[in-house]
Amino acid sequence: MSKLAASFLFGTILIAAPVAAKNHCPPDTLGPNYPWLIKGIMPGDMYAEVFLDVDEEGRPTACAVGQNNVVRDQEYRACSVYLRGWRMDPPKPGTVVSAKVQQLFLIPKGRHLRAQRQARADYFARHPELDSSCYPKDY
């Protein structure tokens, strides 16, 4: 019986060790706007300006694409992403105003991604107290 208990304990430790190792990270107070992310369009990026009509509850109701360098199919995807998942903070109670909002749909490519990786490495070099494995590498 003691062999069974010992193997159960050993198996539990083997299973729990990786979980415990991942829990060494403190709560993420940096994201989602990580300081190493480079905003804006860089050469080689794919982008689309998206114009949204937003209702009183902060939900998009219509979408149009402005300047862009994406293929037609991705214009549709850009609008679809915002219509399905984007929300704006609703206005204060008593305010009945619909809004038009401009957003940037951005697909970072080679130069942009390399610059962000370098900015991330520089950030963690300046902040050795932070464990870089606790934060996303590509966002």
Image (tube, rainbow, N blue to C red):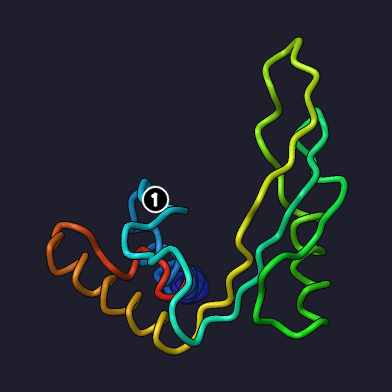
Please name the amino acid that badge 1 sits on. Answer: Asp
Q: Which of 55/117 is in front?
A: 55
Q: How many marks?
A: 1
Q: Where is residue 130 drawn, in percent x and y?
A: 22, 59
In the displayed structure, would residue 123 be above or below residue 84? below
Question: What residue is disc 1 on?
Answer: 28
Q: Where is residue 38 drawn, in percent x and y?
A: 38, 66
Crowding near the residue tagged with mark 1, few <14, some 14–19, many ≥20 C-alpha atoms within 10 Å: few
Residue at the top extreme, as displayed: 94
In the picture, measured across the screen, residue 90 lies left or right of residue 76, that is left
In the displayed structure, would residue 38 be above or below residue 52? below
Q: Which of 4/19 is in front?
A: 19
Kindly indicate the quadrant of the structure image that contains residue 51.
bottom right
Residue at the right extreme, as displayed: 61
Kindly indicate the quadrant of the structure image that contains residue 132.
bottom left
In the picture, measured across the screen, residue 126 lies left or right of residue 52, that is left
The residue drawn where x is 43% and y is 63% is 39
The residue drawn where x is 35% and y is 64% is 134
Q: Where is residue 82 drawn, in percent x and y?
A: 75, 57
The residue drawn where x is 66% and y is 64% is 49
User: Considering the numbered disc 1 on the image, is that residue within a helix, a strand or a loop?
Assistant: loop
Q: Which of 99/55 is in front?
A: 99
In the picture, measured across the screen, residue 87 lies left or right of residue 138, that is right
Q: Which of 136/10 is in front?
A: 136
Q: Where is residue 90 drawn, in percent x and y?
A: 71, 28
In the displayed structure, would residue 81 be above or below residue 112? above
The residue drawn where x is 82% and y is 82% is 73
